[in-house]
Amino acid sequence: MSRKRHKPGQSPEDHDIWARVVESVTPLTNASLSKAAHLRGSAQERPHSEKPEAPAPKRMAAKKLSSFRLGSRAQTPPPRHDLAPNITDALHAAPPRVDGHTHGRLKRGKLRPEARIDLHGMTLAQAHPVLVRFLMSAYSDGKRLVLVITGKGKDRDEGGVIPVRRGILRHQVPHWAQTPPLSQVVLQITPAHYRHGGDGAYYVYLRKAR
């Protein structure tokens, strides 16, 4: 049995350890070498700090917006800014409180007023007590139809904080006639026929005196 020669500086124990290591190594084949070379080349081409590309964002389909008008979805109509509705239209639209025959003759100006009072040119403070005394007296005398003249009014707005509408007395008389104490004696108030003053006067139909 020939004894293997040891390299200078190696002990027999070192030589035995190296021999076992050599026996445990599996030699690389050509396929393994090609795969290792491919992986090494890919690692060199892409730096470690490079991040993978993020997927492109999806484009949202454009939605067609419906037409919109300010206030179109409001549940209630916007409030009016008038101080009060037209008094002539409001009185004509009110249901009649007299019988149909009498109401028809009133509209046509066929009934002659039994008394009249002219409030034209008075202030509200002056006209109210005068009107109350006149209507109460006519009711006590048993009169049924009287004429109240107010005039169509003049523009007296002096630019104050609270605007004053044209014909304020003409608008106030129906309110007085429909509130106490006059509402106890007044049955109906309606604009007069043009032969008795038109929009500048009112027919006041009184209740029967008790």
Image (cartoon, grey):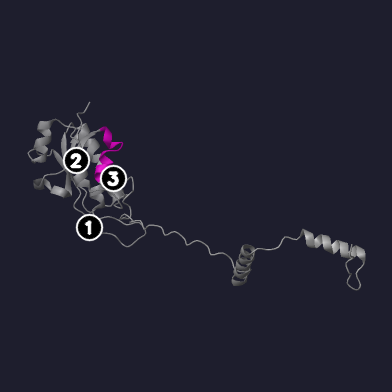
Q: Is residue 9 magenta?
A: no
Q: Which mark is residue 128?
A: 3
Q: Which mark is residue 18?
A: none
Q: Nearer the viewer, mark 3 or mark 1?
A: 1
Does residue 112 appear left or right of residue 158 in this picture?
left
Q: Residue at x 88, y 72 (%)?
A: 7
| Lower position in the chain sequence, tag 3 or tag 2 | 2
Alpha-carbon distance for marks 3 and 2?
A: 25 Å
**What is the quadrant of the N terminus in the image?**
bottom right
Does 54 sit above or below residue 129?
below
Please state which amino acid type lies under the numbered disc 2: Ala
Q: Is residue 183 magenta?
A: yes
Does 136 sit above or below residue 56?
above
Q: Which residues are magenta?
A: 173-184
| Lower position in the chain sequence, tag 3 or tag 1 | 3
Residue at image mark 2: 93
**What is the quadrant of the C terminus in the image?**
top left
The residue lying toward the viewer, choosing from 7 and 159, is: 7
Residue at image mark 1: 154
